Image (spheres, rainbow, N blue to C red):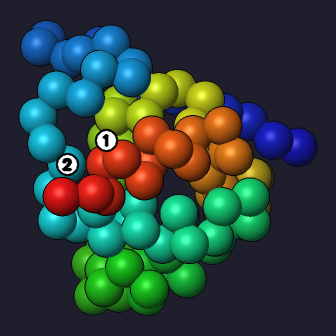
Amino acid sequence: MRTVFAPDHTHSGSSPAGDPGPAPTAQELAVLAVLVESIGRVVSRHELARRSGLGDRSERRCDAILVQLSRHLGPNAITTVRSRGWLLTHEAADRARALLTP
């Protein structure tokens, strides 16, 4: 079962999905780099945290970062694969790479 990881825009000041708003943080870029390296492949929370340098953070930190990345990339860019992890869709690859380019 695949579900789309949709951002929550209920708090004030949120931007519509796909509207980049503020620049991504270093942690967000590190997670995005792992997803870009694994386009189309499911990446578990453990692997995402380890490979992005978030291993010592709360396990839910990846979830929060993925919400922020969805705001930068759009609502259908990151897919949640229940009980397995996340994947970056092929359709979002160019937008993701653009965020990683200085």
Q: Is residue 15 above or below residue 92?
A: above
Where disc 1 sits, the SS reads helix
Task: From the viewer's perspective, tell me whether residue 38 is left or right of residue 32.
Answer: right
Whether residue 45 is visible here, answered yes or no, is no
Q: Which mark is residue 68?
A: 1
Q: Residue at left 52%, top 26%?
A: 75
Q: Earlier in the sequence, mark 1 or mark 2?
A: 2
Q: Is residue 4 above or below residue 51?
A: above
Query: Which is closer to the viewer, label 1 or label 2?
Result: 2
Whether residue 96 is visible here, answered yes or no, is yes
Image quarter where the N terminus lies is top right
Q: Position of residue 84 (x, y in %)?
A: 74, 65
Q: Residues within 10 Å of mark 1 (few under 14, many from 20)?
A: some
Where disc 2 sits, the SS reads loop
Q: Are marks 1 and 2 in contact (CB under 8 Å)?
A: yes
Q: Amino acid at mark 2?
A: Pro
Q: Residue at left 35%, top 30%?
A: 71
Q: Amino acid at mark 1?
A: Gln
Q: Which mark is residue 24?
A: 2
Q: Is residue 54 above or below residue 79?
A: below
Quarter holding residue 4: top right
Q: Position of residue 61 (x, y in %)?
A: 32, 63
Q: Residue at left 75%, top 52%?
A: 81
Q: Residue at left 41%, top 60%?
A: 32
Q: Position of residue 40 (x, y in %)?
A: 74, 58
Quarter holding residue 14: top left
Cα distance in 3D space between marks 1 and 2 = 8 Å
Q: Is residue 78 above or below residue 29?
A: above
Q: Position of residue 12 (x, y in %)?
A: 13, 11
Q: Which mark is residue 33?
A: none
Farthest right residue in view: 1
